[in-house]
Amino acid sequence: MKALQLGKNTRSVTAEVDLPLSASEVWKRISDVSNYPDFVAFMKRVSVEGEFREGSHWSDISTVLYFPLKFRHKIAKIEEGKNIFYLIDLPKGGKILQKLEVVPKGNLTRVGLTIDVDLNNQLMDLLLGKLIERRTRSMIGGTFKKISTQARREKGLLTGDDGKNQARAEVFIRKWYLGPVAVSFVAFVALAIFFGSNPSEIKAAPGKIISKSETIVTNSATKIKTGVNKVNNKLENFISN
């Protein structure tokens, strides 16, 4: 499959994980979309349209952007046992391309995931791009951590204390992190949707906004975005420590 033609503001996130599973075991999990909510971070529900083959679709309800949103995935390409490409169409011509790769590595299997996000809107990228990039990283990291934990437990490589420590971390995140961020994010998205839906009101050359009122609103949105980014940084520091 040729690389998807994406805009200049495309944000790309790539990560890998080595799992103590055979390539066939990994592929079995990947090809069973109905079980994705068991290990994909933020995914709450999934519905499959047709068989697992090129051209088919499946949809999920995800809180990757803090509140439930529906994403419809097209299976753009499959190389059996090797890789899968999922394509998601976003409003106003935006696109997300997800690529999963499975590579045998001796007794392990390396899983690589690359997600390219093109909002196809410079202002939307300014307001939401960094946040989407951070949340995408959190989604990939959470997914890899969860599936790695499951695989290690299946192979008898996970101790009881490891599971308890992970559970305590998840409780901390739910109680102290999601609440305040969700409030800020609702206001943040409201600004993004308003101006994203009224492009004629933005008469900007790169780096310049003509109207004083537009400047005020943009500055306000930037402050909100900075606040959200700070909270994300605190969460990432907590997880890494």
Image (cartoon, rainbow, N blue to C red):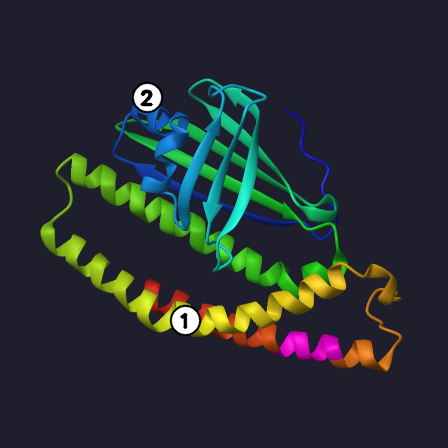
Q: Which residue is mark 2?
A: 24
Residue 113 at x, y = what percent? 48, 39
Which residue does the image show at 22% across and 58% down from the upper left? 167
- Name the mark on residue 4: none
In magenta, the rendered stretch is 217-223
Q: Secondary structure at mark 1?
A: helix
Q: Main secondary structure of the magenta part?
A: helix
User: Of the residues under marks 1 and 2, which one precedes in the sequence?
Assistant: 2
Secondary structure, mark 2, is helix
Classify mark 2: residues with Cα within 10 Å, few (<14), some (14-19) or many (20+): some
Could you tell me residue 21's position as x and y percent? Answer: 27, 30
Task: Please report contact status of discs 1 and 2: CB closer than 8 Å, yes or no.
Answer: no
Q: Nearer the viewer, residue 152 or 32?
A: 32
222 in magenta: yes
Mark 1 vs mark 2: in front: 1
Residue at 46% over, 17% down: 80
Q: Quadrant of residue 150?
A: top left
Q: Which mark is residue 179?
A: 1
Looking at the picture, does residue 65 appear above or below residue 219?
above
Using the image, determine if residue 24 lies above or below residue 18: above
Name the side, left or right, on which 78 lies relative to 213. Answer: left
* Neighbourhood count class around disc 1 (C-alpha, 10 Å): few under 14, some 14–19, many 20 upward: few
Amino acid type, label 1 = Gly
Amino acid marked by disc 2: Ser
Q: Quadrant of residue 87?
A: top right
